Amino acid sequence: MKHLNGTFLISAEKLSQCPDYVLPEFPLLGRSNVGKSSFINALANNKKLAKTSNTPGKTRLINFFNFSDKFTIADLPGYGYAKISKEVQNRWQKHLEEYLLNRAQICSLIQLVDARHDLQKNDAQMREWVNAHKLPIITIATKIDYVPKNKVLNVISKFEKAFGGIVLPFSAVDFRYNEKIFEELGDIIASKTQEG
């Protein structure tokens, strides 16, 4: 399975505005312009589903996308973008923390990291916060097409070493890793269902 039908549901600023449904949810964490919108669009094979932008920091709300009634992905505002006032950043942080810590539908977080670069400081800080709260998380290395083929395994193992847990490559160009990603999300949902 390389694609699922994806539809936009709703945008919310905070937990109380989030949609009320029972589908498993996967929030997307990542720096601004790490490729969150491209990730959503590739899984749905629909370039217009999530708005991509060359201007970092465009996503100001939590945007919810339904994938064939199997799960939802929540696209969160990117972190590490400086051209936003401190006040707005603090408000986002408060709302996002409340959402991530209290949203019952969340199955696992997905942190996107840019495969072209070494681990960034704010990626590591985000992960420290997630680990401190003992939240389930997987890592996806985006823009893998820009990494020479003979270095892909090195890049993946570098992130595995830094983060621990599962790190999956992702390509927005030819979708060749989509199947593995859907498999992983399916496994997470299945194990969560057994727990429940």
Image (tube, grey):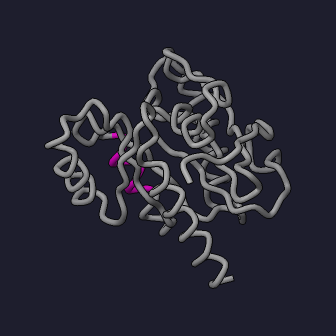
Q: Work out whether residue 85 or residue 101 is closer to the camera in this orientation and state it.
A: 101
Q: Quadrant of the C terminus?
A: bottom right
Residue 190 placement (x, y as % from top left): 61, 75
Residue 146 placement (x, y as % from top left): 27, 30
Which contiguous range is marked in magenta? Answer: 122-129
**Residue at coordinates 74% horizontally, 43% vertically from top-left?**
14
Location of residue 81 with respect to 5 vertically, above or below: above
Horizontal arrangement in the rendering, residue 80 relative to residue 1 (left or right): left
Q: In which quarter of the image is the N terminus?
A: bottom right
Horizontal arrangement in the rendering, residue 99 relative to residue 77 (left or right): right
Q: In which quarter of the image is residue 112?
A: top left
> How many numbered circles are shown?
0
Residue 52 placement (x, y as % from top left): 57, 23
**Residue at coordinates 44% horizontally, 59% vertically from top-left?**
138
Q: Is residue 71 covered in magenta?
A: no
**Residue at coordinates 59% horizontally, 28% vertically from top-left?**
87
Horizontal arrangement in the rendering, residue 180 relative to residue 62 (left or right): left
Horizontal arrangement in the rendering, residue 65 relative to residue 111 (left or right): right
Location of residue 50 with respect to 98 vertically, above or below: above
Location of residue 146 with respect to 30 vertically, above or below: above
**Residue at coordinates 72% horizontally, 65% vertically from top-left?**
104
